Image (cartoon, rainbow, N blue to C red):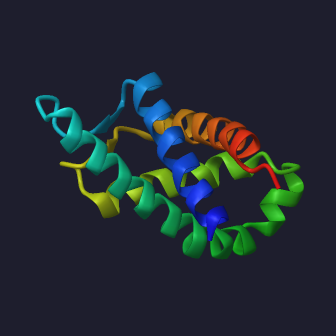
């Protein structure tokens, strides 16, 4: 149970970092309050976690030949598509990724930050 909570927190922190660092990724309305944006971030982190839990393994299975040929670099493209899918599911008023290159950069940032947060939080 704590592992799920750690992953949820890591996803939320990583998404916040991607929103902060990439200008083409927006979270909620610009004039929204901090509490409203925090709730939106938590909902988007939950959606992102479910997408990564259900959709990502299926996509990786079908993309296995490309993953092997590119020595795993195609994972960046898969992460970008998962971020775009999350934006589509959440809706443009909550979370918007404007363009594929923003999604690739955001996916890279999310991967690095969530790895670092999981490294710090998961002390088994």
Residue at horizontal 88 percent and vertical 59 percent from the top: 68
Residue 81 image point, x, y percent? 52, 55
Would you say 72 lies left or right of 6 here? right
Q: Does residue 105 lie above or below 41 as drawn? A: above
| Residue pictured at 82% horizontal, 51% vertical | 72
Quarter of the C terminus within the rendering: bottom right
Q: On the image, which quarter does residue 37 sit in?
A: top left
Near-viewer residue (27 or 6): 6
115 shown above or below 49: above
Q: Residue at x 27, y 50 (%)?
A: 39
* Quarter residue 67 falls in: bottom right
Is 104 located above or below residue 56 in the figure?
above
The part of the image, by quadrant, that contains residue 105 is top right
Q: Residue furthest left?
A: 31
**Residue 89: x, y in percent?**
33, 64
* x 21%, y 40%: residue: 35
Q: Quadrant of the N terminus?
A: bottom right
């Amino acid at each position: 149970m704590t592992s799920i909570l750690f992953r949820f927190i890591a996803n939320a922190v990583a998404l916040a970092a991607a929103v902060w660092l990439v200008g083409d990724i927006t979270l909620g309305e610009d004039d929204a309050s901090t509490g409203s944006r925090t709730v939106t971030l938590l909902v988007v982190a939950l959606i992102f976690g479910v997408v990564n839990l259900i959709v990502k393994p299926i996509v990786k299975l079908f993309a296995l030949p490309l993953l092997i040929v590119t020595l795993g670099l195609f994972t960046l493209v898969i992460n970008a598509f998962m971020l775009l899918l999350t934006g589509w599911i959440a809706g443009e008023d909550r979370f918007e990724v404007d363009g594929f290159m923003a999604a690739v950069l955001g996916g890279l940032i999310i991967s690095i930050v969530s790895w670092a947060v999981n490294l710090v939080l998961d002390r088994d």
